[in-house]
Amino acid sequence: MAYARTTVAEFRSLLIERIGGNETFWDTGEIDLALNEALAVWQLITGDFVLAVSTTLPAGAQIITLSTTATPSLGVIRLRRMTTTATPSPSTTLYPLSIQEADQGYYGRQGSASGTPEYWAPFGINKFMIHPSASTTQTVQVQYYSADSRLVMDGTTYLDLGDEEVLRLVDYAQWVLSFKEGLKEALVNTQPLREMFLVAARLRSAKLRGSALYRNYMGNDRDETKPLRDSNPQAGLKG
């Protein structure tokens, strides 16, 4: 969903306003790095900023590399979805597998006859496997989580986020900048800014709350169904 409300230039201005317009203590490079880090962490823990690119499936090929000359430019974190764009037939979505599932479920798949691709599996960062291989050259649309730097300082590029989420990203960027003021400022005084950012990220992603990544960020222990990191003290022994 494109909000088209806050440009990246306005995003930067919000942070500068938050730090009192102090561009002497924090130079332009530090401000931009803090904003880009906020965007990168948000992307990492929510999976926002999904882009799509068309790529060709050569006849007979099973392992495909996304074209590095495609538009938009490819900064891939993880492949997400794959859909055929063959015409005049309607488009179909390929079913996702892992390489292990493909090996176990389709014995001898590497020598199997080609046909219409039905399955795909990630094979590294910017490569994927299809099964069966295409009998003729086809085109698929690949959705992926983008890792491209999103902070281009102009007045026409928009952040694909709501106003309340933009403010939480500014919170995180301010927290990053606070390390220059000292550890107490970063780890005590501005720590609530980081926590508000993480709460907003949790609300953005329904799956985030139970993820290991979120637990690590919040410093939470594993739940009771998983082994504890520390062993229990033996009976009769004092800690």
Image: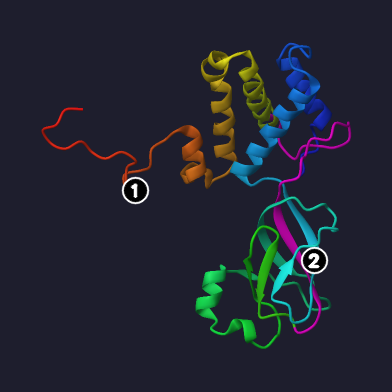
Tell me the distance, in whole angstroms, between the alpha carbons under discs 2 and 1.
41 Å
Is 188 displayed left or right of 65 in the figure?
left
Number of callouts in the render? 2
- Tell me, yes or no, whether the highlighted magenta stretch contains residue 134: no
Q: Which of 4 and 106 is in front in this view?
A: 106
Residue at 47% over, 45% down:
212
- Image quarter of residue 66: bottom right
Is 178 displayed left or right of 147 in the figure?
left
Residue ID for mark 1: 226
Q: Which of 210 and 102 is in front in this view?
A: 102
What element does badge 2 sit on? strand
Residue ID for mark 2: 55
Amino acid residing under circle 2: Thr
- Tell me, yes or no, whether the highlighted magenta stretch contains residue 149: yes
Main SS type for the magenta part? loop
In this picture, which residue range is highlighted in magenta? Answer: 135-163
Q: Residue 228 in the image: state x and y as whole percent.
A: 32, 42
Q: Which labelled disc corresponds to residue 147?
A: none
- Image quarter of residue 199: top right
Q: Label 1: few (<14), some or many (≥20) within 10 Å?
A: few
Q: Residue 10 in the image: state x and y as whole percent.
A: 81, 26
Position of the C terminus, as image quadrant, is top left
Sequence-first tag of 2 and 1: 2
From what the image shows, is residue 104 above or below residue 236?
below
